[in-house]
């Protein structure tokens, strides 16, 4: 006799909290199956299977990204404690539950990309690298290397500072990475991945699930993730050259003048800005020997490289001031990639 005319399997699941990162780890998934059937058209009693229970394992995933859209422009001598142009990073816990991380910051090896297309890293800013929780590092507290707990799906923003050395030059690029490493709860000890181990049904295994990062050795599924941002030095680079030429001596023929007492000497002071940024408040001071006397109203500043015998360029409107034997050329602004020349004359006593 055909005992089984119809069967319907019904799966009953316990309810669990589900967030964007998935079901929380250590949640018990419990289910059983119920069989209904008929015999000769008569419904029979349900048959219930055993209950199966397992724990959701721990998926550890972290994403680090920079909020900077381009290299952060700085000038030499900026100090980490007062810098208001930090590198900015966002760290997101994409794990299926609360997760602790340790953050660290490092210089990337030279030749790494920066945030600006076609530019590469060529210098390290290794002094006073620090991670802060606000954009001015107001409490001057470096949180690198400390345990930080994140809620599931939580984003946190961090700010990285570095001293820019006095010797930094125009066009230098320093690429810096922030790395978040998964650690055991409440510690700074790195977690261990169980991917290669056999599944333990009623225990919480750990599976690293993050992408590869930019730091050396930051591979996919290694329990850490890193992203880069970069400093770019944009500054003035100033060279100063001084020339002299004799323009009259009262005796010799034209162009044959000599530097004798009574002769007029023209000084030319060339300020050459080979950098990208303009100067601000540039002044050049020259103290004359007592053997010469400044020629009144002879000072002028022109917007071209110096030509002592035939001054070139248009007047900039900047001034040359004289006080006793001290001559001061007030260049003010000297644009990047440009020359300005201050001329003045003296008579040999």
Image (cartoon, rainbow, N blue to C red):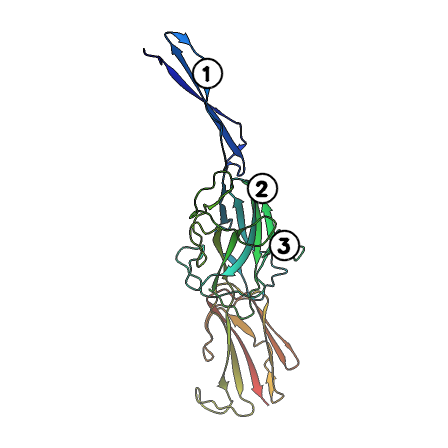
Residue at x-position 63% and y-position 79%: 326
- Residue 33 coordinates in the image, percent (x, y): 45, 23
Circle 2 packing at 10 Å, graded few (<14), some (14-19), many (20+), is some
* Mark 3 vs 2, N-terminal side: 3
How far apart are labels 2 and 1 at the CA level?
Answer: 43 Å
Circle 1 packing at 10 Å, graded few (<14), some (14-19), many (20+), is few
For numbered disc 3, what is the local secondary structure? loop
Circle 3 packing at 10 Å, graded few (<14), some (14-19), many (20+), is some
- Quadrant occupied by the C terminus: bottom right
Mark 1 vs mark 3: give the one in front.
1
* Front-lying residue, 271 or 328: 271
* Mark 1 vs 3, N-terminal side: 1
Q: Which mark is residue 151?
A: 2
How far apart are labels 3 and 2 at the CA level?
Answer: 25 Å
How far apart are labels 1 and 3 at the CA level?
Answer: 68 Å
**On the image, numbered disc 3 is attached to which residue?**
136
Note whether 335 is above or below 290 in the view shown. Answer: above
* Front-lying residue, 47 or 225: 47
Mark 3 vs mark 2: give the one in front.
2
- Residue 34 coordinates in the image, percent (x, y): 45, 20
- Quadrant occupied by the N terminus: top left
**On the image, numbered disc 1 is attached to which residue?**
46
For numbered disc 2, what is the local secondary structure? loop
- Residue 181 coordinates in the image, percent (x, y): 52, 52
Residue furthest to the left in view is 1
* Mark 2 vs 1, N-terminal side: 1
Q: Is residue 319 left or right of residue 207?
A: right
Q: Is residue 49 left or right of residue 344?
A: left
Residue at x-position 42% and y-position 58%: 113
């Amino acid at each position: 006799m055909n005992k089984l005319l119809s069967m319907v399997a019904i799966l009953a699941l316990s309810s669990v909290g589900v967030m964007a990162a998935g079901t929380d780890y250590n949640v018990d998934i419990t289910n059983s199956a119920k069989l209904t059937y008929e015999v000769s058209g008569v419904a029979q009693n349900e048959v219930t299977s055993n209950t199966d229970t397992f724990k959701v394992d721990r998926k550890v995933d972290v994403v680090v990204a920079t909020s900077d859209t381009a290299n952060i422009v700085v000038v030499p001598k900026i100090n980490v404690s007062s810098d208001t142009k930090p590198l900015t990073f966002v760290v997101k816990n994409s794990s299926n539950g609360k997760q602790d991380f340790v953050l660290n910051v490092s210089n990337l090896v030279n030749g790494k990309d920066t945030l600006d297309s076609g530019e590469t890293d060529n210098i390290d800013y290794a002094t006073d690298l620090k991670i802060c929780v606000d954009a001015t590092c107001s409490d001057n507290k470096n949180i690198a290397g400390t345990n930080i707990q994140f809620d599931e799906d939580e984003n946190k923003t961090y700010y990285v500072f570095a001293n820019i050395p006095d010797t930094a030059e125009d066009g230098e690029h320093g690429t810096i990475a922030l790395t978040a490493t998964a650690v055991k709860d409440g510690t700074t000890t790195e977690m261990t991945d169980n991917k290669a181990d056999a599944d333990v049904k009623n225990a919480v295994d750990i599976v690293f699930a993050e992408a590869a990062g930019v730091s050396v050795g930051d591979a996919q599924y290694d329990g850490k993730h890193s992203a880069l941002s970069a400093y770019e030095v944009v500054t003035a680079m100033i060279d100063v050259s001084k020339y002299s030429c004799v323009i009259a001596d009262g005796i010799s023929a034209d162009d044959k003048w000599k530097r004798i007492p009574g002769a007029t000497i023209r000084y030319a002071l060339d300020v050459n800005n080979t950098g990208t940024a303009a100067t601000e408040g540039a002044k050049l001071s020259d103290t004359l020997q007592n053997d010469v006397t400044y020629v009144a109203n002879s000072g002028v500043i022109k917007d071209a490289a110096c030509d002592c015998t035939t001054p070139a360029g248009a007047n900039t409107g900047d001034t040359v001031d004289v006080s006793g034997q001290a001559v001061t050329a007030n260049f003010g602004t000297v644009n990047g990639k440009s020359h300005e020349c201050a001329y003045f004359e003296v008579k040999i006593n």
